Image: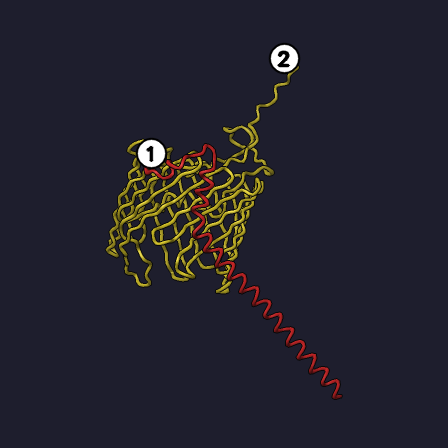
Chain colours: A red, B yellow
Amino acid sequence: MAPKASLKGKGKAGKGSKGRKEQSTANCVKEWSTWAMKKAKVIVHFGFIPLVIVIGMNSEPKPSLYQLLSPV
Amino acid sequence: MGSSGSHAEDRPPATPQTPQPLGLAGILPPKTEEKGDGKGATEKVDWLNLPCPVPFEEIQREALMSLKPELFEGLRFDFTKALNQRFALSHSVFMGSMEVPSQTSDVIKVPSAHYEFGANFLDPKLMLVGRVLTDGRLNARVKCDLTDNLTLKINAQLTNEPHFSQGMFNFDYKGKDYRTQFQIGNNAFYGANYIQSVSPHLSLGSEIFWLGHQRKSGIGFAARYNTDKMVATAQVASTGVLALSYVQKVSEKVSLASDFMYNHMTRDVTSSFGYDYILRQCRLRGKLDSNGVVAAFLEERLNMGVNMILSAEIDHAKKDYKFGFGMTVGE
């Protein structure tokens, strides 16, 4: 009886720790994805317009830098 | 007798998948495509070759273009400079009052001025449009044709303040006589819609969406009936909104549009009636609302590439008078 009870107890403790580990992996994934989304947002915020300009300046026929900067 | 070459019946060519026309041509109802002689009284309908319907979000396109021009108050100046056929930069200045949505029926206007810089890259397969304002807000739109039928669209508004940014990914698939779209947005928004042509004139569609954070979901149905001369649409949603619209093309230059919206939750009923004159040198749109709001919007072509814009909206009940003027240089 006693060993059975202790086995049961150990089983529950084992399951509990495994559950906490699974919870922390889920938390880890959430934290990492939030961090990644934040970094992606900053990159897109600062880099989208330069990206469009770079793609446009490299399209045919290639416009010159003067055309990009002059207001006429 | 020249019966050696049997005179094959002159068949009209198979209906090609025409791309969505740009500019003013886009507002006219699409021509119905039917096989057989065009002027015959009874045309044989080829049920296996129905035309592709308009995208679900553009079901009310003609009505929206006629009845909802971009009315503004103040000064607006847009300059678009094309560096080559596909790439253009745009500078835009706005000085005037912007309306802030308020809970009460009062109108709250905030005077503001901003300068907006934009870059557009338009390729048949890839479209990139970015606009950035002086306060750091970025409006980005990307449209990419992954294959002939599958299109990816990304729409994002990013701000400097945290938690105010919005983004939406749309995957569109265009089939022979149907279109479907799947949307993923921030705040765990998921949506899907599907529209199918059931006859050369009629197309039916439906959409569902799910908001993760508020655990709200909704379903809606839409129908669109269009001929050469008129477009009638109806939309019902489980959020309690019913929207009907009707546009009649009276002549090449004149269209009349009317629109009815009923919101069951707020018991709000609005109906409006408007006209759209597309003349050689100008485009004049005007509308009258059931709330007593009268609005007009004029775009006049002064010269090649130079347009003058006048906008007016008068609401006697709320004592809200908005007049705006501006100029658009470049395409």
* Residue at mark 2: B2
* Residue at mark 1: B305
Is residue B125 left or right of B25 when viewed as pictured?
Answer: right
Image location of residue B319, percent across then percent down? 23, 55
Along the line of sight, the residue nearer the viewer: A15 or B109: A15
Question: The disc numbered 1 marks a residue on which chain?
Answer: B
Camera-side mark, 1 or 2? 1
| Residue furthest top in the image | B1
Question: The disc numbered 2 marks a residue on which chain?
Answer: B
Q: What residue lies at 51% left-to-right and 29% top-to-bottom? A: B38
Please tell me how crowded label 1 is: few (under 14), some (14-19), or many (20+) other residues with Cα within 10 Å.
few
Please determine whether, in this image, residue B16 is positioned above or below residue B60.
above
Of callouts 1 and 2, the N-terminal one: 2
Whole-angstrom CA distance, mark 1 to mark 2, is 56 Å
Along the line of sight, the residue nearer the viewer: B19 or B247: B19
Q: Secondary structure at mark 1?
A: loop
Q: Secondary structure at mark 2?
A: loop
Image location of residue A27, percent across then percent down? 56, 68
Indicate the amino acid at tag 2. Gly
Is residue B183 left or right of B277 when viewed as pictured?
Answer: right
Image location of residue A42, percent across then percent down? 45, 55
The quarter of the picture where the C terminus of chain A appears is: top left
Q: What residue lies at 43% left-to-right and 61% top-to-bottom? A: B163
